[in-house]
Amino acid sequence: MARPGSEYPTELELEILKVLWEESPLLVREVRQKLETGAGRTLAHSSVITILNIMHGKDFLHRQKEGKSFLFSPKVEKKDVTGGMMSDLLSRLFNGDPSAMVMNLLDTSDIDADELNELRKLINRKVKEQKNESNL
Amino acid sequence: MARPGSEYPTELELEILKVLWEESPLLVREVRQKLETGAGRTLAHSSVITILNIMHGKDFLHRQKEGKSFLFSPKVEKKDVTGGMMSDLLSRLFNGDPSAMVMNLLDTSDIDADELNELRKLINRKVKEQKNESNL
DNA sequence: GCAATTCTTTTAATTAATTAGAAGATAGTA
DNA sequence: TACTATCTTCTAATTAATTAAAAGAATTGC
């Protein structure tokens, strides 16, 4: 046995998913262009194809022929990938305790007053939701 | 060029750091034991040594001779590693917007009423802190 | 039709991560 | 001293991730 291979996208794969979540389907050439201008990542055309095909093999992407070239589009949704990666880190760093993770963010990040108010509202809403759920 | 090598601990390295944050310094044999009972990860003795030495090379661990064996202890603090990995995911998934990350957690996780209240208190405290800072 | 352009496939090289056997060193014990 | 137990170091194998050149296939413009 050796490297297991994560169920989540790697660094570069995530970069590519971000490109395709923003706009898709795209040709290889277009993905390459966007990686360069957007993420400052200059890759050879063949490198981009290789990654895209690997991602297709992992079922991260759809692939459809368009003339002689391929069009790629995401097969996984942003919220699912985000959720998966978040819960992965949640379990690995905070033992699966989400409020511990939130506290860490509040403690270590700069969040301005407006945003704090937004969060407070969200929390209030959550509390209400929970009360409703228990009164069914 | 190829794999860059993350500045943050890998999956297994983090597991080992967790063991050593809980109790250190430890002998290889003890780390191995704790990986097995704690994380359900059974590794050969030599495998554990290899990883520990790699981590020592990455400056994640201290190493001191004790008789014929080595004692290992963390050189990096839990809060720094946690902070680093959090800000890494923060930038990669939420474009560096911490409140977006908090919102995601609130939306997708089960947090009970007591914990929500704790978070509300923390937010109130944060708001006050910010007011004080601006009134210097 | 032929050349140029543009794609994909094939091949492969490098580095990181994970795992572990085999060999070598050292210390204790009978 | 010789045997044994216990450590480390050396070596190495496997898989994932990243990157890209070279070779092949197809389409288009003269």
Image (tube, coloured by chain):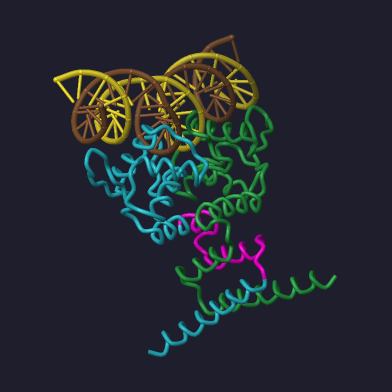
Chain colours: A cyan, B green, C yellow, D brown
Could you say which quadrant of the image residue B70 lies in? top right
> At which x and y percent is residue A128?
49, 85
Give the residue at the far bottom of this rendering.
A135
> At which x and y percent is residue A22?
41, 55
Q: Is residue D6 left or right of residue B107?
A: right
Number of numbered discs visible in the structure rendering: 0
| Residue A57 in view in this figure | yes
> At which x and y percent is residue A19?
42, 50
- Residue A103 painted magenta: yes
Give the residue at the far right of this rendering.
B136
> At which x and y percent is residue B22?
61, 51
> Depth check: C28 or A18 in front?
A18
The boundaries of the magenta stretch are: A88-112
Which residue: 67% across, 73% down? A113
- Residue A57 painted magenta: no
Which residue: 63% across, 39% down? B60
Q: Main secondary structure of the magenta part?
A: helix
| Residue A60 in view in this figure | no
Relative to C13, is A111 above or below? below
Which residue: 50% across, 55% down? B93
Could you say which quadrant of the image residue A27 lies in? top left
> Depth check: B122 or A116 in front?
A116
Q: Is residue B64 left or right of residue C2?
A: right
Q: Is residue B70 left or right of residue D2?
A: right
The C terminus of chain B lies in quadrant: bottom right
